[in-house]
Amino acid sequence: MNADLSLAGRTAVVTGAGAGLGRAEALALAAQGANVVVNDIGSAADDVVAEIGEAGGKAVAVTGDVGDWSMGDTLVSAAIDTFGSLDIVVNNAGVLRDKMLFNLSESDWDDVIRVHLKGHAAVSRAAAAHWRAASKAAGGPVYGRVVNTASEAFLFGSAGQPNYSAAKAGIVALTLSTSAGLGRYGVRANAICPRARTAMTEATFGEGTSPGGLDVMAPERVGSFVGYLASPAAEKITGQVFVVYGDMVALMAAPTVERKFTAADGVFSVAELGEQITPYFEGRDPHQTYAAYGVAALDDTGTSKH
């Protein structure tokens, strides 16, 4: 393997790694030589550890809910105590509680925000504290990679997923903050918006294959990209958002200003706002938000979930 892609001697934590995307990511990292801390809430984590071991890799299972703040410290300690280092964090764990906004309960909201957003934050915070201390001890940058799991829902919204969409938007903001705050210590942080057929999304994506027989929505396709972002070859990549599925990796641009409105005398009145802004939107279908144009720019295969 190219040295810039090898993860030999590195240690990764992958949350939600008992199945689906997390499992594919854990296996991909192990295949590149990384030791893997496999986290999930149940015994499926042990199955993935066994699978990695059978392939000649090294892994340890840590069961528990990343929505519990202390789990971040537990996972970081497991990496260091078992393998001697922590180099890579892949935040993947999530749950779905799909409801229209008018049917959304408090628990529907809290469960999704807790596991997705708080779970990302808990592990990222613990890893950040470790890398900051390690950098200070070393007197310079260390090796750190964070790959967070967002969704196109953060950009375009999803009518039946207000909780999920909000959590994913928060994860992107968390990723940008992580990149900005930890770059001096050597940490690189990026977010992916994957589309993959897993137990969580089997109702969303129909069956499909591509040349070579690999399902076009196979989570292994995403796992390969995560392995790349975790590698030394991705040293210059940080604070970015990628859409990943099939044969495509799309780098998302930062938001741009579509149109600027300026008050003639320095302060807007309500009347002047109406005079300037209302005509700009005349003739538009109110359902044609910027999200509709963004979806069309990629394709029409549907909303991304992981």
Image (cartoon, helix red, strand yellow):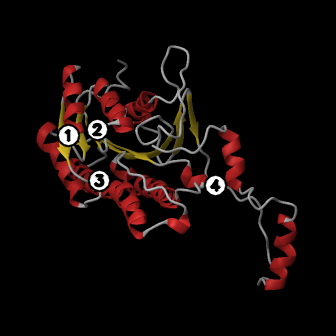
Left or right: where does residue 195 sit relative to residue 45?
Answer: right
Give the CA separation, mark 3 to mark 4. 27 Å
Residue 18, numbered label: 2
Mark 3: secondary structure: helix
User: Vertically, is 168 above or below 274?
Assistant: above
Q: Residue furthest left?
A: 81
* Chain-order first, disc 4 or disc 2: 2
* Chain-order first, disc 3 or disc 1: 1
Q: Say few, some or many: other residues with alpha carbon within 10 Å of mark 4 (under 14 / 14 to 19 / 20 or more).
A: few
Give the CA separation, mark 4 to mark 2. 35 Å
Q: Which quadrant is home to the C terminus?
A: top left
Residue labelled with disc 4: 255
Q: Position of residue 290 (x, y in %)?
A: 70, 55
Residue visible at 26% across and 27% down? 8
Residue labelled with disc 3: 123
Q: Position of residue 126 (x, y in %)?
A: 25, 55
Give the CA separation, mark 2 to mark 1. 8 Å
